[in-house]
Amino acid sequence: MWGAWVSAGCVVAILGLIVAEVVGRNLFNVSLYFAWEFSAYFMGAAFMMGAAYALRAGAQIRVNVLLENVPKPIARFFDLFSTLCGLAIGIYLTWALGEMTWFSWMRESRSPEKSELLRWIAQFPLAFGSLLFTLQVAARLGRLLRGEPGDDASLRIGQDIE
């Protein structure tokens, strides 16, 4: 759940940076050189940190029209197969982002922009969010194998749950 809160905080930070940039340019004729760069970092962090919560809440894009129009055993097979594929992709993504972050930390790599931010600082939320997503996919697989629903409808926002 806290990954979703971090994601929401990143979106608020993007809003703050862009508003500050617009106000600075229009009222004071000053540009915040780091606003666009940091907004991009926050966007990546928002995406990856919120992915696990979105999967748990069932907010990921799915082809429900297919699952609803085939017999239940076939729908279960598709759900299990897609979850296994998601797990494989998540493991690879977590490994790749973790390795990239580790190498950036070891080499003390810096952003080519004026801020010269250490790259691992911007990359760490991506790697950690990917790890959270991969763990959530593994938990989803466990729930499906036990015959439980893959997502938690009670986490969906704006829907009446009985």
Image (spheres, rainbow, N blue to C red):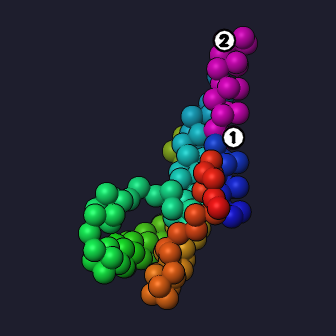
Please, is residue 150 above or below residue 41 in the view?
A: below
**Rounded to the nearest whole Å, what is the CA distance between mark 1 and mark 2?**
21 Å
Q: Earlier in the sequence, mark 1 or mark 2?
A: 1
Residue 100 location (% of width, % of height): 48, 66
Determine whether, in the image, residue 85 is placed left or right of residue 18: left
Q: Residues within 10 Å of mark 1 (few under 14, many from 20)?
A: some
Circle 2 sits on which residue?
26
Residue 133 location (% of width, % of height): 53, 69
Q: Amino acid at mark 1?
A: Val
- SS state under label 1: helix
Which of these two is toward me, 137 or 37? 137
Residue 111 location (% of width, % of height): 54, 48
Identify the residue at image location x=51%, y=56%.
59
Residue 50: name its quadrant: bottom right
Q: Residues within 10 Å of mark 2 (few under 14, many from 20)?
A: few
Q: Amino acid at mark 2?
A: Asn
Q: Which residues are magenta?
A: 12-29
Circle 1 sits on which residue?
12
- SS state under label 2: helix
Determine whether, in the image, residue 17 is placed left or right of residue 119: right
User: For the residues carrying marks 1 and 2, which lies nearer the camera in this image?
Assistant: 1
Please, is residue 144 above or below residue 107 in the view?
A: below
Identify the residue at image location x=26%, y=69%.
70
Answer whether residue 59 is visible to the viewer in this image.
yes
Please, is residue 140 above or below residue 128 in the view?
A: below
| Residue 21 on the magenta segment | yes
Identify the residue at image location x=53%, y=69%.
151
| Residue 75 on the magenta segment | no
